Image (cartoon, rainbow, N blue to C red):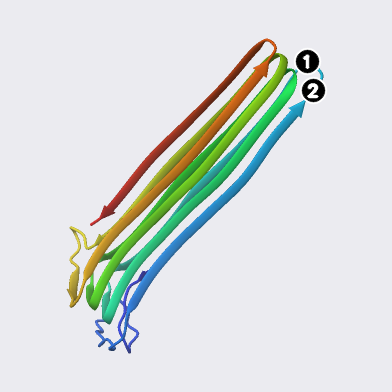
Amino acid sequence: AKINQHGAGAAAGQDDGVDSVAGEAQSVDVRASHHVASTSYVSGLAASAGVFSGAGALSTNLFDSAATARIDGATVNAADAVVVEANGSQNALAIVVGAAAGLTGGAATGVVNDFSTRTEARLIGGKVSAGELQVTANSDNAASLVGGAGSLGAGAAVAGTALVNIGRATTLARLGSNVTATDVAVSGEVAVNALSRSDFNGLAVSGAAAGGAGIAGMAQLHLLQNDTRAL
């Protein structure tokens, strides 16, 4: 969402030099939002009276999204508030279960979650006259990953579970820049806020029971890279 020119009582292009007088209760809102969510349930079951029984289950979530709200090089008049706001959220729930039973049993489960998001609100250049000015970017990312594997074998049994969670979030709120003049005349509050939250949880369980050798393994990897700035 973007605006190049705003004034009460007149429609004006960015370069036509028209300034308008704001009405008493006039406000300007520029908002952009993106919200994505995923829920997945995967199970794999196997049983055999033969030599081998194997089961596997895998869940993958790949998110790549962006929201940008901006006012660039515009003349904006508002007696009330000018608000530039961008909001983004990504949420995932994945439950994966695998089980195998046989003379030799093997079960494996995996969950891969990859978040990439950019949320930006900015006001750069031009002239703003208002009662209040708010430039806000909000980003909220959360995931709950559950993986379980179990195997039962009369001879040998092997079970393994792996959870991989990768999150990259850029949250930026900007008023002005070093290379572009921005004229701000505000009688009340000026607020520039960038807020981000990342909440990732994982539960991995595996078990193996055998008359001979039983092996069970679990692994979790959480890699988070957040860049949150208010400028």
* x and y percentages locating residue 47 in the rendered image: 77, 26
- Residue type highlighted by circle 1: Val
Identify the residue under disc 2. Answer: 48
**Element type where label 1 sits in the image:** loop
Which residue lies at the image location 23% right of the left edge and 71% below the top edge? 126
In this rendered view, identify the residue nearer to me: 77 or 53: 53
Contact, mark 2 vs mark 1 (Cβ under 8 Å): yes
What type is the residue that disc 2 sits on?
Ser
Q: Which mark identifies residue 117?
A: none
Establish if 48 lies above or below 167: above
Residue 173 spot, x, y in % from top left: 29, 59
Q: Residue at x 32, y 47 (%)?
A: 227
Q: Residue 210's spot in the image, x, y percent?
A: 68, 15
Inter-mark Cα distance, 2 to 1:
8 Å
Q: Nearer the viewer, residue 104 or 90?
A: 104
Q: Quadrant of the C terminus?
A: bottom left
Q: Residue 75's image quarter?
A: bottom left
Residue wearing tag 1: 51
Would you say 86 lies left or right of 98 here?
Answer: left
Q: Is residue 83 left or right of residue 158?
A: left
